[in-house]
Amino acid sequence: MSDFKFTAPVIQELLDSELSERSPILSLQDKILAIRNSLRPGQQQMADWQSGPLAISAVPGAGKSTGMAAAAAIAIARQYERSSSRRHLVVVTFTRSAAANIKAKIRKDLKKLSLPQTGFFVYTLHGLALNIANRHSDLSGLQLENVTLITPTQSHRFIRNAVEQWIVNNPERYLRLLEGHQFDGEETERLRRQSVLRTEVLPELANTVIHEAKSSGISPELLREWSKQTTDEYAILSVAAGLYEQYQNLMRSRDFIDYDDMILAALRVLENNSARRIEQNQVFAVFEDEAQDSSPLQTQLLEILASDAGDNSSLNTDAINRVSTADSCTDAIHRVSPNSSLNLVRVGDPNQAINSTFTPADPIYFRQFCEDCDRIERLATMDQAGRSTRIIIEAANFALKWINNQWLATTNNKQQTPDNRQVPFRLQTIRPVEVGDPQANANPAPVGRGLELYTPRDIHHTVELLSQRVIELFGEDPTQNSAAILVRENRQGRWLGEALASVCKEHKIILYDVGERDRRSHVPQEILALLQFCDRPHSPDYLKAALEALVQRQLIPTQDLNALASLPEEFLYPGPLAEPQPETVQKAARLCRSLLRARLELPLYQLISFLALTLNYDQAELATADKLAERVNQQIAGNSSMGGMLSALSEIVSSERFEPVETEDSEERYTRRGQLTIITMHKAKGLDWDYVFLPFLHENLIPGRFWVPPQSQFLGDFTLSEVARAQIRATLHEESIIPDVSQAWEVAKNLKTSEEYRLLYVAMTRAKLLLWMSAAQKAPFTWSKPDNLQEQAPCPVFPALKRQFPEYVVNLAAMTKQT
């Protein structure tokens, strides 16, 4: 790995500036030097960038955003010096909150340089694409006043409609899926399989493939070509291509677009030579944060924009040609050479790539960019981190190396593989900062041991131990500390919130369950599901959607909903000759019948409020439902009917223009002092707390079991969506042969396992002063039934940590004697 060998001329230039203080240019150089000297070595390497491609691989807590902001301000200052043109810097990051944060930091550094707080733009990737498409609407094909932006999900009506259209147009293929591995023709089983295919398997396949294909510039036609290279009995890629094509047709017919359409529209603009030169001439460089989360099309867009307008290299022409020909885009990117005119700085951490199994993000592209830059000595490593105490860093480093070694031992007979995509982590060690680090309180002293490893009897014992430690840590003045419990699933968070509520209230500790707000955002969808059932109770689809909402709210027990929904009348109103229903089915049927009675007895305008009470909403959810009811009733004033209400509510859900009731909208609410935050590991990325608790570290969740839901096992020991995803990515990664079903399923399992381990690594590195980890001996098999406790094996990393750090294992027997 190179260590950034092109900084010496820059440093000499800065030192020469100290010879005089009279010139305003030299005075600016002094200020640049002052900002540079306030940075760590890795951050300084970014600040020394002047042109060309540069990859920055940064460990957790290394100060990526601080370094990028300083580097951006210095780059803008140099641009002021060397040119009077109005070209600006484009900074791209992953979320709106991250964009606001880095924008504020750049302005602060420009103020230190006594420069105008201009010369740059900060965008999310989709915001940048939309900006380009909007400026050239004649080329992009987007007329923003006429289109509606949606985020397609498995339950979105366009996905569901695409599935229904495909079934009508492809009866033979659908029949083959219905038969599965074996089928005796029994009518009840046929109806159950129909429900599974129409509401679960095919929507999931469509949703997965649409995201994967569109984000890579792959058309349905190309996907259909690829399917000819496969021989599986269901022709999975061909089915996926048909679903994708139906979805695209529906979107076009209604003037709807999704986020990938924004990227494609921007790339259509850049196909035009004149428009491309206009855009490139406005930009002197592009800085990208969180580059490990980029998709192929996003990478293309940035590389075209960051290229010199006068450069006719293959990077420009190949990339834009891929868009117009709908060919695979990956060979049009990452062509980095010593003489490249690509003014692109990409910053990320491949070891924090935790979104690739449920989004189109693929960390392999940033890894490849790092390797290409390394070959031309344009790779810098930000490996010093001051966030955490030293023992937390040691634990995270050990976990990373242990997981990689175990992976190689089981998959490669301990032979190091040159292909870095085969291991979960890039071999990159976090180092504590050096003496005299400019950051205040870097690598702080630990609280207590700094690392505490517990093995409670069960999850109730876990809550006792966690509560006791929280009370000790917050002490007499809770306002001095921040703490978070990171969970793998929202269901764990909900259970913990209920278990800890009284303790936190007694000790005046604010308890904030982030999952509660996420649940409020689902209020319109849940209300719509129940209203659609009330309107058409004979529909298997609507009945199942309503039952799913009731299960999610824990109002009825978890059970096989496909069996119930396949025969609505028999479920809701069983005849005298029908077999007796189990108690779980009776409870679900009684609740559904009460909804139907309310539909007949209540006036229309009261229905939403009644359903909100039925769903047992909390105060904030009820406020959100009231806001929703008011909005719907306003829209249907003068045309008050169930059809009008469903139409208005469907439009609200599909257009995603309804915000839940919320008093504030800032990531700071997650990290406030005096607060114990319950948050998922995924949502915790980019945040940190003084104390971090990681309970319930069990093997069945991390790395988890890659399993086939029982209701769809008639298709085989795999899921269509994961096989399709693995086959598409293998082709994008330029592998010579598309893997067959069994190979693709193994690849998918390995990708999922790798990502789960990276998620644990992210969670561990959120802690500053204390990392509290536990794996109870008994825990639920599934958190939808938290009272059903069983012996559960710990996450494999946890026993390894206990062996490596025995002095940090808490002796529970001794604690019991003391109490």
Image (spheres, grey):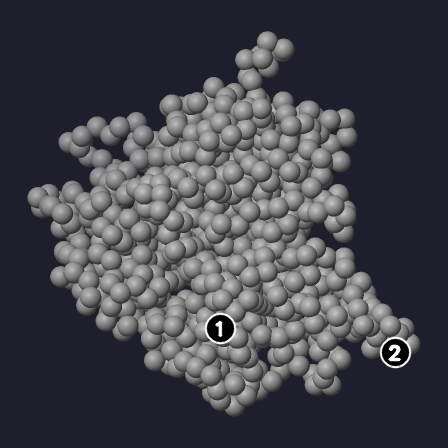
Looking at the image, the residue that sits furthest to the left is 184
Q: Which residue is most to the top?
A: 817
Which residue bears the numbered disc 2? Answer: 23
Query: Looking at the figure, which quarter contains the C terminus?
Result: top right
Q: Residue at x 88, y 78 (%)?
A: 23
Asked if 239 appears above or below 319 in the picture, the reply is above
Residue 290 location, x and y as percent? 55, 59
Q: Nearer the viewer, residue 748 or 307?
A: 307
Can you give x and y, in whole percent of width and height, for residue 387 in the image? 66, 45
Q: Residues within 10 Å of mark 2 (few under 14, many from 20)?
A: few
Q: CA distance from mark 1 to mark 2?
A: 38 Å
For residue 270, say whether it is visible: yes
Among numbered discs 1 and 2, the one appearing first in the sequence? 2
Side of 36 where 666 appears, left or right: left
Name the residue at 49% across, 27% down.
803
Task: Give me the residue at 75% from left, 70% from top.
Answer: 12
Tag 1: amino acid: Val
Q: Which residue is mark 1?
A: 336
Q: Secondary structure at mark 1?
A: loop
Q: Nearer the viewer, residue 673 or 814?
A: 814
Q: Tell me if residue 415 comes above or below residue 156 in the rendering.
A: above
State the residue in front, 647 or 604.
647
For residue 206, what is the image quadrant?
bottom left
Question: Element type at marker 2?
Answer: loop
| Image x and y of residue 167, in percent | 21, 61
Name the amino acid type tagged 2. Ser
Q: Is residue 510 visible?
A: no
Farthest residue toward the bottom?
Answer: 274
